[in-house]
Amino acid sequence: MKLRLLALAASAAVALAAASSASAADYAITTVAGDHVTDPLITDFNSNSSGAITDLAAGYTFNQGPGGLAFTRDGGLGLLSGVSAPPPADNGVSGAFYETVTTGGAATLTAKTPLDYFQFYMGSPDDYNQIEFTFANPALSPLILTGTQIWGGSPDGNGDQSQGFTVSYHFDAPVSSVTFTSTGNSFEFDKLAGSVPEPASWALMILGFGGAGAALRSRRRLVPAAAA
């Protein structure tokens, strides 16, 4: 069932109460060639200490996971054959750090205030790259995009190192975390940006979640009585 959580709170409550299992959120993807990431910037990875990201905007965390399978790297170092290729805008540029997620690795951005818009710059798109968006509303299934689904279907995910794209996502339900993984070497990206819903919209969604929970609890209480 498709839920539009920016509708009236009452509508959201009715829709959620009617759902008997996890539902899916609606989203839209826009892809533009080149580095066109805009504000509000979350991080550009250029400030780091021993691989830890230190330039994150307030209200965010970025976890690179265990084992050193996800790490930042200086684009000025150029290609690390078989492991990491800098996105085109970073390639050969000293101090232009970017993120690399190698085979079996994971890097997760978590937002204290969930996002309804997310944008990032990726290089050498591969069909074994993957992104998982987790929604603030636990009734919604995570959105998992693999390969060409990440950037909307074109170009092919052939790892062309000359290609770099700014990919933007608009969601009708707020996202609390974004996880980047890969089943091959590697998923390379830079510059994360995002925005949160307007306060009025956020309050409306919270009311919708609360109303739906109350409706479901009431329904559970009434069903045994009706059966009797």
Image (cartoon, helix red, strand yellow):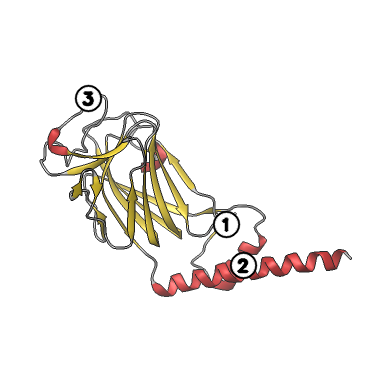
The residue positioned farthest toward the right in the image shown: 228
Relative to 94, residue 116 above or below? below
Observer-nearest residue: 174 or 164?
Answer: 174
Q: Where is residue 216 in the image (x, y as percent from the top left)?
A: 68, 65
Q: Distance between the residues labelled 3 and 2?
A: 52 Å
Observer-nearest residue: 89 or 98?
Answer: 98
Q: Relative to 52, is 23 on the left or the right? A: right
Instruction: Identify the mark at residue 212; answer none if there is no mark.
Output: 2
Taking the spot 26% from the left edge, 60% from the top edge, the residue there is 57
Q: Position of residue 151 (x, y in %)?
A: 36, 42
Instruction: Identify the mark at residue 32; answer none if there is no mark.
Output: none
> Is the N terminus in the top left, top right, bottom left or bottom right quadrant?
bottom right
Q: How crowded is mark 2: few (under 14 residues within 10 Å), some or many (20 or more)?
A: many
The earlier-in-sequence mark between 1 and 3 is: 3
Relative to 190, residue 216 above or below? below
Mark 3 is on which residue type?
Answer: Ser
Q: Where is residue 11 in the image (x, y as percent from the top left)?
A: 59, 69
User: In the picture, residue 222 is in which quadrant?
Assistant: bottom right
Taking the spot 54% from the left edge, 54% from the top edge, the residue there is 140
Mark 2 is on which residue type?
Answer: Ala
Q: For numbered disc 3, what is the local secondary structure? A: loop
Residue under circle 1? 139
Q: How far apart are marks 1 and 2 (CA)?
A: 10 Å
Taking the spot 25% from the left edge, 49% from the top edge, the residue there is 53
Residue under circle 3? 81
Q: How far apart are marks 1 and 3 (CA)?
A: 43 Å
Q: Relative to 74, is 146 on the left or the right? A: right
Q: Position of residue 223 (x, y in %)?
A: 80, 65
